[in-house]
Image (cartoon, coloured by chain):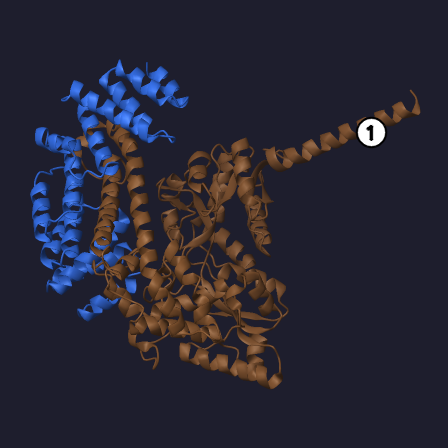
Chain colours: A blue, B brown
Amino acid sequence: MRRFICCALILGFLGTAVGAAEGASAAARLKAATAALQTPALTERDSQRTKQELAALIAAEPGSEAGLAARYLLGRLRQLEDGISEPPEFIALTRDRPQHPLAQLAAVKLLLRRLYADGIAAPAERLRAAEVLGKSLTLPALRGDFHLAMGDAYIFYGDQRAPALRHLRAAEGIGIPSAATRANVLVQIGELARLTGDRETAVQSYRLFLADYPRDLRQQIVRDRLAALGEASP
Amino acid sequence: MNERGKARLFWSGLAVVFGLCAWHVARVSFKAEETSDHRRVVRVGHFMLHSGIREALQAVIDEYERRHPDVHVVQVAVPDRAYPQFLRTQLVAGTAPDILQIGAHFTGMDELRARYFEPISAWVEQPNPYNAGTPLAGRRWRDTFLDGLENGEAYSAPLRHYYGIPLAVGGVRILYNTALLRAITGGTVLPQTYAQLVVLCRQVEDYARRSAKPVVPFAGSRLSALFLMSPLFASVNHRLYYDLAADHTLRMTDWDYGLTYLQGRWNFDLPSIRLGYELAREMARYQKPGFYQLNTGEATLQFLQGQSVMIVSHVLDVTNLKAQSDFAIDAAQIPALSPDDPVYGAGVLGPVTEIDTKATANLGLVRGAPQHAAAVDFLRFLGSRPGMEIFSARSNWLPSVEGVAVPAWMEPLRPVRAGYAGRFFAEIAGKGDARFVVGNQLHLLFGPAGGVDAFLKVIKQSYGPAMHIDLVKDVRESTFNLRRQEPALLVSFLTADAASIAAGRAESDGFWREVSSQNGYEARMLRTQRILSQTASQP
């Protein structure tokens, strides 16, 4: 069956591939759907058909791993292709299986949209909603992403330095995998701590930045900041 | 056999002999893995045809062959215009040299790298044995390069692997005709400050008038003018740059200039922006009228013919210029503005840093190279301190490896580490539509009948709408990229180790690392979208 689906995809018979997958296991159907979505010549019609297939898969096996993965994928397609900020698949996934890794990831995607998606919610309301959603996150990588998103959001909505600093320090504490992002966060922590009067944290973060990113364009300005705090540069 | 038959036989025989010879030459040049004396042949394909570079590379090869008598390294030098086609056809046909130069700007380079180049990450994470006995001994190989291999040719961000070993460091400098400078000023050293540079330019104009010689201060072209003006414009706007970085990162991304403009946080009437353009116009005065329509080759010709004292040039072009000129050429940094400059100093913090200058001319290892081990070993030698000392001494290119000595005249070519961000002018021009809006009107700024007011009057009308279009396109493209990543990310989730998924830690690689990267990208895109919708109703 798998070979047949692959051949159909290679030959460009997307409908045939997805159709063939209908009689297969849930895992094979999901695989066919993901392969179909990666086809370079994907049309609007193909995409609709794949969404229908994912919806059928969810209905057939709502609690299986394949069913949960299908729910996540369909939710993402609704966000990215249809512009639906809070797709029902994500709401169901985060409600029914909140500890599942894909449900946690869906929560982050919902959180980002609660922070920034078009709507009439006031900044304070957006931030509050995101904080509430963030409480459900337990996986370290996603908690780190949550803290980064919140740190930036508190700055974006009115330069609220104290909560932004708290979140960015939490993200650094968990560990930031991207070197470029971590360099930004160390500078942000230094700046926010300096501006809120936490000299010790500012100095520590500036020093860490200077040591870990010796080729960064901000070396001089961060050295200036240290000097202004009465500290010698390393 | 009649005469005709004999002639036919003769020509057929000759054709067969010719064919055999041609086959032999081709085999040696393109396929041979061994010479007749049984040495292994490593082939290196590149497009570094600048004067003296092939000779410099050959000097490294000669030393390598002396150390490894069983290896013969052959250069396959290809003109730069033909190189992209050469690269693709040779790789696809499976006839590529063992080592090939990488051009990050080539169309589809990441796809080529993914399919046909072998990552060298494992080697660059280890010490380079050829650095033994030098101060670099024991250090991770990639840390021995001045840029840490953080350049787009050596490292592929999408593929997250290292692929190239760089031969030189880039940058921009003023090159000057030392004899002409002496004739005009009596000295041989360029001034250190911008104010002194303006005085020098006036001296040159005065000299040209007195001697009736067609000499101007700078040989101008579109590119060299931007090289000259960009860091000076950035200096004038240093304080503005850091003020605009409202997210407390002390840096602006390429798109932040447009976003902050749309948010009304800067405009073309700000004193430092106007001053920056006034400075650009002042520098334009010291180049031939119409310079902005000229290309680099035309500016080079002016300089080589003694019609200008200075040219602002990429440092890799120094070798070419020195080889073609019949006068001594020296190099100097673009004179810096200082905060106490009476005209331009208000927004200046200090010089512009070049700390993140990237290395260039990267050579990569071809996947399945016939002489894989020898090719890796040769790259290690080339990218070691002893190898780079040989290459740099003969090429006049700034060495990419730390601690390699250069002659005194090359010292001013080295990147300046201290200083502040120098990225404003280029980004003001934006990308896409906004770049054309600004770039197409620069004649109003530089032309004798134009001026800052004439220029700004036009771009104030068109920059905002153009930037809005560019940012909308960026959001659309980002959404498309996210959508394209999604099925691959799910496959990565389904095939990942269950324990690592459950642990949920974003290590240096793996599913959660990808997720983290995507979340950051998506947050930026959504923020941009929010700013666009907040500012859509504004003029």
Graded by Cα atoms within 10 Å as few (under 14), some (14 to 19) or many (20 or more), the crowding at tag 1 reads few
Residues B22 and B3: in front is B3
Quadrant where the image shows the C terminus of chain A: bottom left
Along the viewing direction, whichever of A180 and B241 lies nearer the viewer = B241
Q: Residue, x 59% and y 71% (percent of image)?
A: B328
User: In the rendering, at what x and y percent does residue A224 appear?
Assistant: 24, 68
Q: Quadrant of residue B157?
A: top left
Find residue B537 and report its image quarter: bottom left
Residue A66 in view in this figure: no
Q: Residue furthest right?
A: B2
- Residue at image position (53%, 60%) is B317
Q: Quadrant of residue B245?
A: bottom left
Residue A131 falls left or right of residue B368: left
Q: Which residue is identified by label 1?
A: B11
Vertical position of residue A81 compared to residue A23: above or below: below
- The residue under label 1 is which amino acid type? Trp
Q: Nearer the viewer, residue B534 or B138?
A: B534
Residue B417 position, x and y percent, is 36, 64
Residue at figure coordinates x 49%, y 82% from the top left: B202
